[in-house]
Image (cartoon, rainbow, N blue to C red):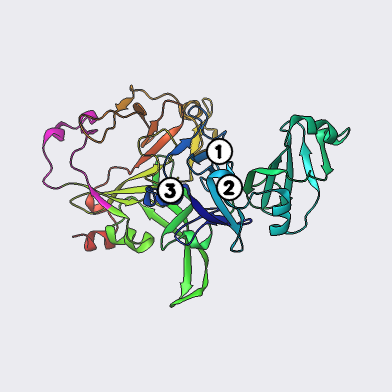
Amino acid sequence: MLDLEVVPERSLGNEQWEFALGMPLAQAISILQKHCRIIKNVQVLYSEQTPLSHDLILNLTQDGIKLLFDATNQRLKVIEVYDLSKVKLKYCGVHFNSQAIAPTIEQIDQSFGATHPGVYNAAEQLFHLNFRGLSFSFQLDSWNEAPKYEPNFALGLASLQIPHGAMVKRMHIYTGNNLQETRAPVMPLACFLGNIYAECVDVLRDRVGPLGLKLRLLTAGCGPGVMTDAKVRSLERSIYFGDSCQDVLGALGSPHKVFYKSEDKMKIHSPSPHKQVPSKCNDYFFNYFTLGVDILFDSTTHLVKKFVLHTNYPGHYNFNIYHRCDFKIPLVIKKGTDSQTEDCTLTTYSKWDQIQELLGHPMEKPVVLHRSSSANNTNPFGSTFCFGLQRMIFEVMQNNHIASVTLYGAPRTTSQARPESSSSSH
């Protein structure tokens, strides 16, 4: 049985690990994977058709704990303990729930001190006792007790004394004073772990198509060797098609992984007559998982030729490999026959039908993308469809959301490359 420390408005954890409010989804999953021998039977709950309308939930069924992540920013918003018989809980090092200690109203009062009177919710038949960043819900012993506490005012809610011996049914840890209105806080310093994260990514473009990316980055910077001075620093970096490897390394630091393309499955769709000629060396990707971005370099010039932005929707084959890239792609839409134009923006949360309304329907049929880890494996999430428009390829999921956007640079010759790029490529 897990023995966990409760920190109101902050976290639930022990000496080995901690689920902290504001923690990215990928980090929580990484903790669960690392401690899979102790924490077993984890469910991932999400809405397949409308993934942004409901929280993304990790349900630790064996331990009676739910971790609720904001569907948009994918950071931890609420920690719920829904079965206190499956876990030991302590506050400031002292247990208030274990096999020996029942979590009664008296015990909670002793451990956490005086608070406001309880609030009774008739619809749930529960009393709620609220502290800042922490709330307890108490079950009445029997249905017969309920009418005594049935209020005649305040729309079914009233401040009342909780009956003696009432037991905690659920506990919530969250930010602020109101569980219903709480939001996921910004990522805590402890979650950076030396990585760099993207607050947002703007696609830079001209009238014809994309030119590059402007990234607003977050990093936990600290003075030389002084952890106490650590604070979150924000910086801006831009990278362009035709930038060299060194340009990108200088702007973003080392990638998490370098991936060499073994084959180009999209080559068959290219009109070029030389497409069947095998390349002597392979193009390679820089994978920046915490930015949600891949950058493809040409194998001969070592210059950027593609960017891939990942949305990390649940129900996609690559879910939880990348952090969500919160991107904005400005579009210039021609209106009518005259030269009037309208500016609008595509985002990580735009749906394919909205994009088609703005950009028009692709001329060609989509390329169907079947992903599997080996020839014999089937992908449980089904295929996705790739549509090309304005030097962008949109990978569309079956629920109409965008799984990834691939941006292409304009065809350029090596003589057009930046002078410092061509001289430093190897």
View extreme (right): residue? 152
The quadrant holding residue 72 is: top right
Can you say whether 46 is above or below 426 in the image?
A: above
Residue 377 x %, y %: 25, 30
* Disc on the earlier residue, 1 or 2: 1
Task: Verify whether residue 269 appears in magenta.
Answer: yes
Kind of residue sitting beneath label 1: Asp
Q: Which residue is mark 1?
A: 55
Q: CA distance from mark 1 to mark 2?
A: 9 Å
Residue 242 x %, y %: 30, 52
- Mark 1 in CB contact with mark 2 (< 8 angstroms): yes
SS for tag 2?
A: strand
Q: Which residue is mark 2?
A: 77
- Mark 2 in CB contact with mark 3 (< 8 angstroms): no
Q: Which residue is mark 3?
A: 26
Residue found at x 78% / y 39%: 120
Residue found at x 34% / y 24%: 366
Residue 336 x %, y %: 53, 25
Foreground pick, 205 / 159: 159
Can you say whether 115 is above or below 306 in the image?
A: below
- Mark 1 in CB contact with mark 3 (< 8 angstroms): no
Q: CA distance from mark 1 to mark 3?
A: 15 Å
Foreground pick, 305 / 227: 227
Q: Which residues are magenta?
A: 258-281
* Disc on the earlier residue, 2 or 3: 3
The answer, for residue 16, to whether it is visible in the render is yes
Kind of residue sitting beneath label 3: Ala
